[in-house]
Image: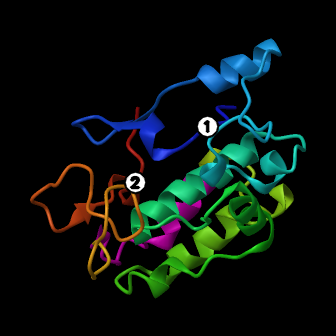
Amino acid sequence: MHRDIKPANLLIESSGRLKLTDFGVARIQDGGDATRTASGMVGTLKYMAPEQVQGKRADARSDLFSVGVVLYQLLTDRRPFDGANEYEIITAIVADDPPPPSQFNTALPRGLDRLIERALAKEAADRFPTAADFARALREAVQPGDDTTVRPPPGPRSGPGEAGAPPARASGAARCRLPWAAAPRAR
C-alpha cells in the first residue's frame, strides 16, 4: 500500500508510462512511527478513502479510491471532495457522492461515470478489488470504438491547482491522449 496517492506523487515518463513516487507515508506506517496531520491522519486529506479519514483499517482498495480521486480530477479539472476546512472535506469524503464527471466534461464516455462511481464507493467492498480489475474496467469504459481523446472541460479558470484553474505547466495541446485506453502491451 502507498497511502498517499495524489497528483504530486505521479510522474509520467516521455513514453507515457506512469510512475508512482514518494513512498514515505507507506514506510512510516510500516515502521509504526507515523507522522500525522493536525487531526491525526496520515496522507493527503483530499485524496483519502473514507476508511482512512475515519481511522479504520485501510488496504489496497483505499489506494484505488485515491486513484479514483486523481482520475476524477484529471477528467474534470476539480477534486470530487473539497471544502473550506478539514471537517467539510472529511464530511464530503464520508457522506457525499460527487457529480458524475460527464456533468463537467460532456465529451467523456458515460462508462467513465460508472467507473468513477465504483472507484469512489464509500465502502471498500464496493470498490474494485485489485488494480488489475480497475485497469480492465477503465479500458472497457472507453471501448475500442470510442474516442479516447479527452478534452479539458470548457470554461474560465481561476488559480493554479484549484478547480477551474489553469494547469501548472501550460502545454500547447488542446487534447490529451489517454495512454491506458489502448490495449495492454505485452511485456
Q: Residue furthest right?
A: 56
Residue 79 image point, x, y percent: 52, 64
Question: What percent of the width, then of the height, locates residue 18?
Answer: 39, 39
Residue hosting label 1: 4
**Residue designated by label 2:** 180
Residue at 39 percent across and 67 percent down: it is: 77
Helix, strand or loop at disc 2?
Answer: helix
Q: Type of residue at label 2? A: Trp
Where the N terminus falls, by quadrant? top right
Q: Nearer the viewer, residue 75 or 139?
A: 75
Task: Using the image as rendered, state which of residue 157 and residue 20 is in the foreground.
Answer: 157
Label 1: element kind:
loop
Along the horizontal axis of the image, is 25 left or right of 101?
right
> Residue 141 magenta-drawn?
yes
Q: For the magenta stretch, what is the residue range?
A: 133-151
Q: Mark 1 packing: few (<14 Cα in 10 Å), some, or many (20+)? A: many
Q: Position of residue 43 (x, y in %)?
A: 66, 37
From the viewer's perspective, is 99 left or right of 86?
left
Disc 1 marks which amino acid? Asp
Q: Is residue 185 magenta?
A: no
